Amino acid sequence: MYTPKIKLGDKVYLIYRGKVSKFVVCQFCNGQGIISSNFNIDHKLTARCPICHGEGGKKEWGDTQWQLDIIENTNIPALYKVGKLQLETTKKYEKWTIMCEETGIESGSCYYMEDAFLTIEEAKAECDKRNLTKVKES
């Protein structure tokens, strides 16, 4: 009998396939979001950057690839607690799925066990492997 690699209560790192984004700093204001000018010694004028509109830059989207799930607006890997395990069975396949406490049990997101890992090193290695496979297939 097959024993799942992930057990109820385990903490896991999840990977997913999605567009990669990066923040590009505005060259006009050097990421400050404002520009300033000295008209004379006593008066300094500041204004919101007309290029980035005060954001300091912009998010650019790259290729779709496998990546580690991170906490929103950070670079910190998200760690989830497994709250439910379920065997999904169809005529074509059997796949284990998990639901995590942080995303909701019964009403939250469902993840395939093959996309969940006990260590961050395993998760990163699998992303690298899957992304390399994608490049070879292209």
Image (spheres, helix red, strand yellow):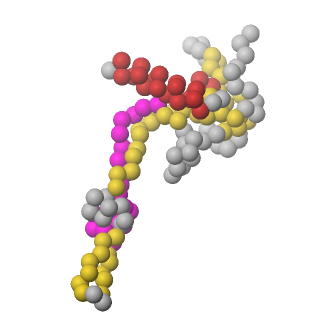
Q: Which residue lies furthest to the bottom in this view?
A: 42
Up-down relation of residue 133 to residue 39 (above or below): above
| Magenta residue span | 48-66
Q: Position of residue 38 (x, y in %)?
A: 26, 81
Asked if the magenta segment contains residue 98, the reply would be no
Residue that appears at 42% across and 19% down: 133
Q: Nearest the camera: 30 or 23?
A: 30
Residue that appears at 49% across and 34% down: 67
Q: Position of residue 52 (x, y in %)?
A: 32, 62
Residue that appears at 46% across and 23% down: 130
Up-down relation of residue 90 to residue 38 (above or below): above
Up-down relation of residue 16 to residue 95 (above or below): below
Q: Nearest the camera: 89 or 50?
A: 50
Residue that appears at 65% across and 22% down: 96
Q: Nearest the camera: 36 or 73?
A: 36
Q: Quadrant of the N terminus?
A: top right
One can see residue 46 in this view? yes
Q: Quadrant location of residue 116?
A: top right
Q: Where is residue 25 in the image (x, y as percent from the top left)?
A: 34, 55
Up-down relation of residue 48 to residue 122 (above or below): below
Asked if the magenta segment contains residue 49, the reply would be yes
